[in-house]
Image (cartoon, grey):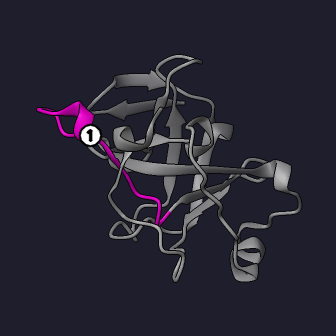
């Protein structure tokens, strides 16, 4: 299918790559269909592009690729809502904020990760209440 985007222009994607956000992204409750776009296979950052709003794309990252400790304990309700059957089917990504005038000021939202079930294409954003994680964790301060 063809997907029109403001940032990337018209792109061709397979429909089976679209995730249904059954647990919506905070502040974007009406948008449920998103696709992960990879500029290249080895790119650190990816993009979460809305399939419903051409102007909406979030830069995202897998914190697992970075060198610091981050643990996500999924509530049973999230496991059930997303239909998760095994840990291998789970992809955890985090939204980043990259200032145009200072990329070294990039922050990662560790408090509210995006959870993807790659087996059934259900996804959602959850808040890790009581975790102590920050919504604006400085990325480059912690990298070694």
Check the image and name the residue furthest to the left: 101
| Residue 68, position as x, y percentages in the image | 56, 46
- Magenta-tinted stretch: 98-112
Horizontal arrangement in the rendering, residue 139 relative to residue 79 (left or right): left
Q: Is residue 47 above or below residue 124?
A: above
| Residue 135, position as x, y percentages in the image | 36, 64
Q: Is residue 72 magenta?
A: no
Q: Which residue is mark 1?
A: 98
Closer to us: 7 or 89: 89
Horizontal arrangement in the rendering, residue 60 relative to residue 121 (left or right): left
Q: Is residue 30 above or below residue 93?
A: below
Check the image and name the residue furthest to the right: 85
| Residue 1, position as x, y percentages in the image | 54, 30
Q: In the image, what residue occupies the spot 70% across and 79% down?
A: 75
Dot 1, how many residues are within 10 Å of its Cα: few (below 14), some (14-19), or many (20+)? some
Q: Is residue 102 magenta?
A: yes
Q: Is residue 26 above or below residue 92?
A: below
- Dividing the picture into quadrants, the one containing residue 15 is top right
Closer to us: 58 or 68: 68
Q: In the image, what residue occupies the spot 26% across and 40% down?
A: 98
Q: In the image, what residue occupies the spot 29% across and 41% down?
A: 106
**Tag 1 secondary structure:** loop
Magenta stretch: dominant secondary structure:
loop
| Residue 20, position as x, y percentages in the image | 59, 57
Horizontal arrangement in the rendering, residue 132 relative to residue 134 (left or right): right
Horizontal arrangement in the rendering, residue 18 relative to residue 101 (left or right): right
Label total for image: 1
Q: In the image, what residue occupies the spot 57% across and 38% down?
A: 67
């Amino acid at each position: 299918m063809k997907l029109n985007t403001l940032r990337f222009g018209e792109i061709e994607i397979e429909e089976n790559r679209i995730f249904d956000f059954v647990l919506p992204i905070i502040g974007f409750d009406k948008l449920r269909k998103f696709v992960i776009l990879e500029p290249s296979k080895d790119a650190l950052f990816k993009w979460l592009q809305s399939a419903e709003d051409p102007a909406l794309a979030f830069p995202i990252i897998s914190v697992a690729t970075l060198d610091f400790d981050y643990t996500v304990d999924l509530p049973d309700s999230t496991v059930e809502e997303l239909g998760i059957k095994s840990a291998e089917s789970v992809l955890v990504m985090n939204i980043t904020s990259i200032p145009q005038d200072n990329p070294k000021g990039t922050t990662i939202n560790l408090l509210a990760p995006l959870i993807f079930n790659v087996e059934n294409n259900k996804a959602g954003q959850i808040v890790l209440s009581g975790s102590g994680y920050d919504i604006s964790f400085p990325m480059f301060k912690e990298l070694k």
